[in-house]
Amino acid sequence: MQNQTLIQFFHWYYNEEQNLWTKVATEANHLKEIGVTSVWLPPAYKSNNAAYDVGYAVYDLFDLGEFDQKGSVVTKHGSKEEYLKAINALHDNGIAALADAVFNHKAGGDELEKVKVKTVNPDNRNEFTSDVFEIEAWTKFTFPGRQGKYSEFIWDHMCFSGVDWAEDRKETAIYSIQNYLGEGFENVPSTEFGNYDYLMFNDIDYRNRAVIEELKYWGEWVVETTKVDGFRLDAVKHISSDFIVEWIDHLNHKFNREFFIVAEDWNVVDIQGQLAYIEATGGRTQIFDSLLHHKFFMASKDESFDMRTIFEGTLVQTKPDLAVTFVDNHDSQPLQALESYVEFWFRPLAYAIILLRMQGIPCLFFPDLYGGIYDDKNNEGEDVHIELAAIPAVETMSKIRAELAYGEQRDYFDHGICVGWTRAGDEEHENSGVAVLLSTGEEGFKAMEVGKHFAGKTFIDALGYREGQVTIDENGWAEFHCNAGSVSVWILKVG
Ligand code: CA
């Protein structure tokens, strides 16, 4: 079996000439060559700002770039046909495709409705700050461009628990929709702001059975239509866990298989929320290890960070089987909502940690392979030019993960700035075994054991940062080196 490796094949500012779906098809074979086994694709359905939006402002889940809606037939990423071709190309290379499922909200309603609401205190959404009154809100979705194809479901205010815009008053607030479904917002995993059901746009209310059934049907439809192999679930801490459980069980049962599913349960404070989520969903989903990402961010900002504590309180340490590890994503990249971009000097170190160890399934981030250049405005409204350089070491390590990072793991997390580990290799993977050493301070060295079966053999740094070679002694040990603020990945020299 080959180690699993994901890639998030997009970022917030993808602006290459080729649209993203075409880029996926073009790159599929290369991704296979560097050991990628699954590709997470951004939302493929029509969003409110069809031609420009990355896809999280969902308008119509059934429009994969097929209907003239929201000012465009295609989405920012391309047409439905191109999306299907991209998935095909991945499959041709033995790579799984993961669809991005945004179930928290819908944006860009087609018609206004008169809706009874109460406002809530934004800092405590359990507290109403008004009596019931009526507003006009964009809560009706009829999808005139699609005309009932694939689904005739019409969304209205009974499908939503809240909105943030009153069209008649031209006013913003968090409006809790008053209907028969229940008082206030529904129970969701996050209790931040009292109840964090409401995030943005029209918040989907899972107390409405018709909504649950419609999204179960959509799950069937999207699997049958696109042949995707799994899902990335957006913003699950704002969504009823009971619904998520029902949706996953329905799909697995319907198709008689276990879909790979990874949930975004963003948390950088402590692990309790993620553990509670695992309990609430019976461990049905992998979870992105945002806590480890945050540790990387901290370590990259502070050279006195104690590397012995890098895994403390992370998901990959506590529940390694459910952790999807990553260095950054589209939300943490510069100028985005959760900006916390890991500094460039530390990125190869962070990638070594997620790619070359036994625990967790790593997820590469598009700009680290392909780079990214973009211009945007910061919070002060000033123009900002950002260049994210590709990091060749990431591809090298991804390949090593696929080919060589197997077998027993011996840890040497015994020094504040210099830590390492070895993998002993296994019989199944020829020449496998690896010794990794990284330093966040000055040049590092450490004696580490790779195993007696390597006695007398020679290791070299696959990243090429360190010249020379290392000979393993008769007990299976050697002293390995790395440069200052760097990582070296020592592998068996072959031939
Ligand atoms: Ca919600």
Image: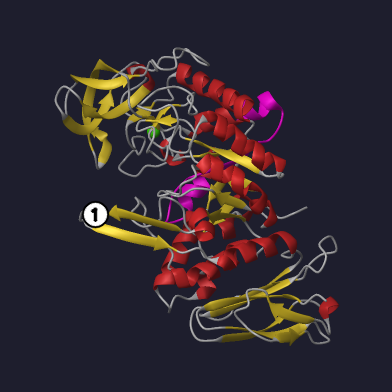
Q: Position of residue 67 (x, y in %)?
A: 45, 22
Q: Quadrant of residue 125?
A: top left
| 133 horizontally vs 34: left or right | left
Instruction: Assess whether residue 273 is covered by the magenta stretch.
Output: yes
Residue occupying the point 35% across, 17% down: 156
Q: Position of residue 66 (x, y in %)?
A: 49, 24
Secondary element at tag 1? loop
Q: Pick out the residue farthest to the front.
A: 17
Q: Quadrant of the C terminus?
A: bottom right
Which residue bears the numbered disc 1? 379
For the record, the magenta segment spans: 249-276
Q: Quadrant of residue 192?
A: top left
Q: Judge whether 316 appears above or below 68 on screen.
A: below
Is residue 235 something one can see in this rendering?
Answer: yes
For the image shown, how many numbered marks are present on the structure? Answer: 1
Q: Position of residue 168 (x, y in %)?
A: 16, 22
**In which of the image's four quarters is ligand 1 placed?**
top left
| 405 horizontally vs 242: left or right | right
| 98 horizontally vs 211: left or right | right
